[in-house]
Amino acid sequence: MSLSLGEARDRAAGVSDVRYELELDVRSPDGFRSRAVVEFASGGGDTFLELHRAGSLAVTVDGQKITPGYDGRRVALAGLTAGRHTVVVDARLSYVTDGEGLHTFTDPVDGERYAGAYLGLDIAQRLFACFDQPDLKAPVTLTVHADPSWTVLANGRAASAEGSTFRFATTPPIPSSLVTVVAGPYHSMRWDYQGLPMGWYARRSLAGPLDRDAAELRRVTEVCFDHYARIFDEPFPFDAYDQVFVPDLNWGAMENPGCVTYAEFLLPRGRVTDDDRRRRAMVIAHEMSHMWFGNLVTPVWWEDAWLNESFADYMGFEVAETVAGFPGVRVAFEAAFKPEAQVADLRGSTHPVAPSSADVPDVDTGTTIFDRISYGKGNAVLRQLVTWLGEPDFLAGVNAHLTRHRFANATLADLLSALDAASPRDVRGWAEVWLRQAGHDTIRVERRGDVPVLVRDGIRPHRCTVTAFRPDGVAAGSRLVDLAGEPVELPEWAGLAVLPNAHGETFARIAPDPHSLGVLSRHLTTIPDPLVRAVLWAALLDLDLLAAHLPAEPSPTLITAALDRILNNVVRRTLSPADVPAALDLIAGACATYDGPDDQRALALARGLVWSTRDTALLRRWLEADAIDRGVTLDPDLRWAAVHRLAELGAFDAAEIEAERLRDGTVEGELGAASALAARPSASAKAAAWAAMTSDPDISVTRFRALAAGLWSLSHRELAAPYLPAYLAAAPSLARRGSAFAAAVGRAFPTFPLTDGELDLVRDALRGDVPTVLRRFWLDELDDRTA
Ligand SMILES: [Zn+2]
């Protein structure tokens, strides 16, 4: 059982003023030593520290050795007197390979070992004995014993390094979930900026890509830093800012105070496209904003996870788009992230952007809150709030909130009172409909005569841009409209097509009238503003629209978003199994136009072609040339995608896959090969994949995911479908390893359409004892397939 809200409230009532002094010894590859000196004030009575599966355990309380109650999760501290106490917990713990705890990774390129503490909800207890809840923030003073040749990074500024002992400065109060240590022979770029030591780091075997992108990474870091220094009253809250690309991170990035960790896909080995650069800048801006949202001011409990993630997601896109030099990132948000949030908001599992604490009764439920509602919808809703309030009032309220609760915890009510005081508008009324209620409105276009009229079906006020179009698709004008209960007539645009929310300021389903729909879908790809096209692609996408317009769409961002959404939402989930082959042929036909003057557009289409085509000669030609036909080099990722598709089509055997693995030599090559072997259309290949997924209790999340991607072949469901019952039977126990692995098991659900009988098997399985995180994935899969 994960920590419950009631337990957290009780403990916070009795424990305060916590400090940690930690000592970690990571010199042995077979396990690590964790010694925590925990100082705190107690109101008297019983409490507990969390510590996950300690191998050996020695505990003293105020200098007296005790033998505490310990169940593998909690160290009981019984009968404390009121006053200050010092508890020392010295333990031997295990490394992990699932990215939850002190993760260990050995690089196949050079045999070098890396260790990194990847924490999060309920995971700090896998690193050290602690009060593992967000409202018991504490200063941390850390010492690490590691190979003297290694780079060792942590939340605080490096204080000294003597031999194998690395010491760090004491941090300000931080939540346990955001403690980190990163250690290994990292390649680096370090510099000082505005008095702060900064750095970018990557594995030694990724030195080339890090050096290639170093100037851009440094520039984006500095621009974001300057921007936040300008808009926030509170100065940067920590004493260093290191950013590290780490292996096997389960999240895109993690906002540890002073030491942000990034997943390595953000440092591509192959070509870095403009979309890659925009996304990375967005993530850098997102994580840095967390230094204020989440780190300086932290939620009391996980129902306010959105206070971290919605703000950071909004800031990430906004700052990348308007400040950091990456216009176009908002196009990706409108075309990909926002429509996925709308899908999530229609499921049974949707929830208010800001749920109540009672809706998050334990940490496992908290884990499921880190979803498309808290990120994508919350981001969109905050953009609507800024449009509605005006940025000056919004920032005034936010700054008052950050200053009032600096280095402490706060709730939605605290934020609302600060915003309310800063604005003449009814912020509490706005929050009631936008933040406290799930679901979204529809904005329809009707006609009175030929005058367009905007009508809202729903309960929320909307302020958004409406754009009118002539019959030839040329824009005739735009204006900002406030829409609430009363319909809004647009007599100046009589007879014209209109598109509400043309710039995406609000979060609503858009339903144009038949006239507008006709004009807009006819001229979709000739509308010059890609943001308007993004809104249209998102609103109108289906297989027919894709076939008609993809070949003429100029934006690689929009091509990628449309293909991803068609594959995941339509082909994999809502088609009947018999219709899949024809759909793949139709997509391949639309993508076969990849030959053109724009390399990045060609790459985006080639990525769609590679999973849909049946043309094995074409894919073999690509591999031989190491390029798509017109000379655009194959990225390692695209090369593996071609190998995977050839294997799936039965046109690439195990020996050829092995030769590709050796040619690549990296961990990505290992995973690509595992996935391609699993994708081969034979019963023995599927059996081997399933055995590999389930026989090794220490299998990494990345390997499990690669094997699942091969097992559930869209083109050979008859070979893979027999594994559905086995998957449903094995998944609950596999998922008990931890929340990240539970999510990996949930994502390993079959990625092809299921028959009614197969859907019934899933419903039956859900009647059993299914862990919270896994259950959420299965319920969402059922919703997506039966909507
Ligand atoms: Zn975040």
Image (cartoon, grey):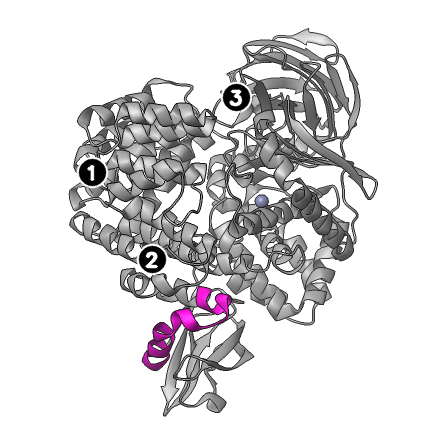
Residue at left offset 19%, top offset 53% = 582
x and y, in percent, of residue 14 in the image? 67, 31
x and y, in percent, of residue 47 in the image? 62, 24
- Distance between the alpha carbons at the discs numbered 2 and 3: 39 Å
Residue type of the residue flagged with mark 1:
His
For residue 695, above or below residue 206 = above
Position of 184 with respect to 554 (left or right) is right
What residue is pinned by disc 2?
A: 593
Disc 3 within 8 angstroms of ligand 1 (CB):
no
x and y, in percent, of residue 698 in the image? 42, 19
State which mark lies toward you, 2 or 1. 2
For residue 161, above or below residue 756 = above
Residue type of the residue flagged with mark 3:
Asp
- The boundaries of the magenta stretch are 513-534
Earlier-in-chain disc, 2 versus 1:
2
Q: Nearer the viewer, residue 532 or 414?
A: 532
Residue at left offset 64%, top offset 36% = 211
Position of 192 with respect to 135 (left or right) is right
Q: Main secondary structure of the magenta part?
A: helix
The image quarter in which residue 694 lies: top left
As drawn, the residue found furthest toward the right would be: 195
What residue is pinned by disc 1?
A: 716
